[in-house]
Image (spheres, helix red, strand yellow):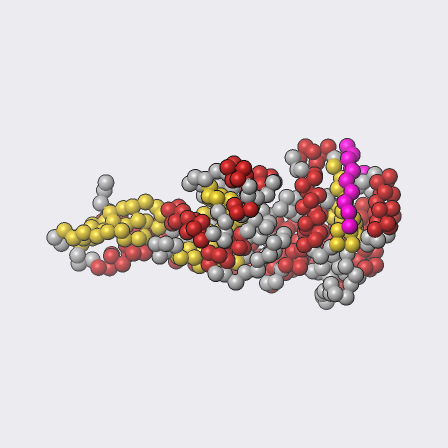
Amino acid sequence: MRTTTYDTAAEERPRAVLVSLVTDEVKRSGIDPVYSLEELVALAETAGVEVLTTLAQNRETKDTKWFIGKGKVQELKVVADELGANTAIFDQELSGAQVRNLEEELDLKIIDRTQLILDIFAQRAKTREGIIQVELAQLSYLLPRLSGQGRNLSRLGGGIGSRGPGESKLETDRRHIRGRIDELKRQIGEVEKHRTLQRQRRKKSGAVQVALVGYTNAGKSTLLRQLTNADVYVQNQLFATLDPTSRTLELPGGREIVLTDTVGFIQNLPHNLIAAFRATLEEVNEADLVLHVVDASSEMLDDQMKVVEQIMEELGAGGKPQIRLYNKKDLCTPEQLELLPEDEGNLRISAYDEKDLEKLMNRLQEELTGGTVTYRIPAARGDLVSQLYKIGEVVSQEFEEEDALYEVRLHKGESEKYAYMLEDYKVQP
């Protein structure tokens, strides 16, 4: 099928009113509606939208026809007309019928939070894998809503909410879209097989993997760049990078590890997106250590940490060894800094501070070291000495008649692979 792409220069820039509905269900969920709306503003601006104003409504439950009440729809119409808006973006997910009803009543393009996030991902995806994953997520989201999308797509012919698959795909019947979804899932399966083989090769070689995870815009990509001189895109915006990047990092003792940056998390991250990116996010599951990067300067850092932990649990990686990095300490007030813990499992850092990076590297060295063991190696067994250097760092050596005593600081990963070959030569404490 032909894919229609959207040229932002050729289309009118979206000018939007942002709308939030606060129901009893939202209050029970623990989500802060004020912060969520502020985050929606940041998401919209990241997507290239001009945000004109915001509206919020409190109701016990959502309106099945209008989502917000009929009276609020009329208020939204007046505000949109006065400000010259061409789009309304809702902070919660809408059904196809609600999109259709609102669109016809308001004569605006209607977008919800999920569609907005998917649109940003469509802009950010650069690799074949990322593009496949985003298209799968978009089509899975749109399939049950096709009845509410026809006029929306034909009237504006592109733009926010319709990037990626393109209007020609979305206006075909459900059967063809289901066929496309099946094909994309098959391609994702191939990606998953490839990643599994890569992980198996890394394990066989004894390579240790460390994964960077965190809320979007916490500074993961900056940290990766500062530690490894990686050529990665760094920008102060949500979802600045999408495709995962792995780089080799040499620790102070000379050992090399693989450091992988993963996609940033966000509250209400669309389930379709988590499902589509599961092959990529499996890198977190397979990591020997997780570095949870937190924006220490954010007033919502506790909520952001909870979101990351919940998604980690959902991925099955909740029990992974973890070090929490309170990043952007240079942007914190003295009062904020005082509240941040600093111990074996928590470090306060700035990704731009060389001393903090050195402190982090030393902490990684400690965490990825499996203790110290002494081996007695016969002088004639030079082949075993080479194995010692594979399983860790030789701290000292002494010679006793026909033998040599080697004190070795073990490396996790390598020691688990090769130590059995040296078991008979271990000196018992």
Question: How many numbered circles are shown?
Answer: 0
Furthest-front residue in this view: 334
Q: Position of residue 142 (x, y in %)?
A: 73, 52
Q: Which residue sits at x=42%, y=55%?
A: 257
**Stretch in magenta:** 52-65
Instruction: Say whether residue 418 is left or right of residue 320.
Output: left
Q: Position of residue 353 (x, y in %)?
A: 47, 52
Q: Is residue 396 above or below residue 183?
A: above
Camera-side residue of 158 and 254: 254
Q: Position of residue 361 (x, y in %)?
A: 41, 51
Q: Is residue 157 above or below residue 144?
A: below
Q: Is residue 64 magenta?
A: yes
Q: Is residue 89 magenta?
A: no
Q: Which residue sits at x=24%, y=59%?
A: 383
State which quarter of the image contains the N terminus.
bottom right
Camera-side residue of 225 and 321: 225
Instruction: Say whether residue 392 is left or right of residue 80.
Output: left
Q: Which residue sits at x=73%, y=55%?
A: 49
Q: Quadrant of residue 248?
A: bottom left
Q: Is residue 337 visible?
A: yes
Q: Is residue 21 above or below residue 155?
A: above
Q: Position of residue 197 (x, y in %)?
A: 48, 58
Instruction: Say whether residue 1 is left or right of residue 127.
Output: right
Q: Quadrant of residue 298?
A: top right
Q: Is residue 198 visible?
A: no
Q: Which residue sits at x=66%, y=37%?
A: 31
State which quarter of the image contains the C terminus.
top left
Camera-side residue of 339 and 58: 339
